[in-house]
Amino acid sequence: MTYRKFWGLLFLVAATSYLSGCGLKQHIDVYMEPVAEGENAQINPQAGSITVEQKGVRITLEPLDSAKLAELIEHPSINPYVVEDGRNLVPLYTVFGVRVRNVDNRRVVIDETGFLIDAHGDQYASLPYSFFSDVYDTPSPRTVVYHDIGYRYSYPYPQSLYRSPYRHYFYGHLHRYRYHPPYRVYHTYPDPYDLNDARSVARDTIFKGGKLFRGAKRSGLLVFDRLELEATDVSVIIPNVIIMNGEGSRSKVDFEFDFRQVVAVEE
């Protein structure tokens, strides 16, 4: 199921953080660059966004990196879109902010789902709120490797009472303890209050489709499974935007936005 991929990514981040503590200190920065395609596409270089206007409907799409995602909510522990990795915040998903405005039509109907197509031809649908509701309703424990320097001596008690692992070694008839690096592995569950708050953040920020009358606007987030690092050129499509003007006047139009994923590795 998809939520298993979510918890698997959390485990990957935890493992990466642990390896970083062992000396493999690399920080991967992933961001999107807008690519202008077509006469209707306008790029805002400061925001990195693309605005497309067709038939009196204006849609702006802005990719959100870890810094922009962090601005959504003050506390990272209840941010459903990032996870803490040491001093860094790592995005769990590929996220775009979307703003829709009905400029000059009687009514516009837009669906809540967008689609992303990567350079390999793989297609992703944006994740609905129900996905996040399932994730936070069925949390999995997080495995933590803890470096415990508290116990450095072999005491004459059962091995299970020590936080530091000791192993038995036999040298002929002699039974001895031998000290090993003190690592402890344990499982921890997320705070239920944090889970509930994170669910509320997802509910309030996920883009919701609907009807827009003349002059109305709507905004939110289109959240996709995190792209593979090898993916470069991507297209985001907001399909079947319905435009209605008077009796019998009804048309559909697709909005397409092109971006390039950039991966920068910092030592």
Image: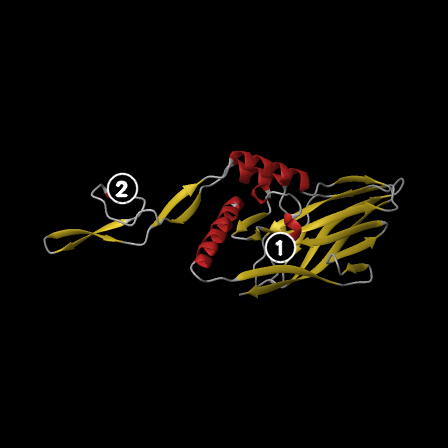
Q: Residue at x 73, y 50 (%)?
A: 239
The amino acid type of the residue labelled 2 equals Ser
Image position, residue 171 (x, y; %): 14, 56
- Residue 117 relative to residue 22: left or right: right
Tell me the residue that label 2 is attached to.
160
**Label 1, label 2: how far apart the Cα atoms are:** 50 Å
Give neighbour class at mark 2: few <14, some 14-19, many 20+ (Cα, 10 Å): few
Secondary element at tag 1: strand
Q: Residue at x 65, y 38 (%)?
A: 203
Q: Residue at x 57, y 52 (%)?
A: 89
> Between 197 and 152, which is closer to the camera in this rendering?
152
Q: In front: mark 1 or mark 2?
A: 2
> Between 49 and 166, which is closer to the camera in this rendering?
166
Image position, residue 30 (x, y; %): 61, 59
Label 1 with label 2: CB-CB less than 8 Å: no
**Quarter of the rendering containing residue 209:** top right
Tell me the residue that label 1 is attached to.
123
Image position, residue 140 (x, y; %): 47, 41
**Quarter of the rendering containing residue 74:** top right
Secondary element at tag 2: helix
Tell me the colour scheme of the image: secondary structure
Q: Residue at x 54, y 40 (%)?
A: 135
Image position, residue 186 (x, y; %): 39, 44
Q: Which mark is residue 80?
A: none
Give neighbour class at mark 1: few <14, some 14-19, many 20+ (Cα, 10 Å): some
> Between 21 and 7, which is closer to the camera in this rendering?
21
> Between 164 and 235, which is closer to the camera in this rendering?
164
**Quarter of the rendering containing residue 47:** bottom right
- Residue 155 relative to residue 86: left or right: left
Q: Mark 1 vs mark 2: which is more N-terminal? A: 1
The amino acid type of the residue labelled 1 equals Gln
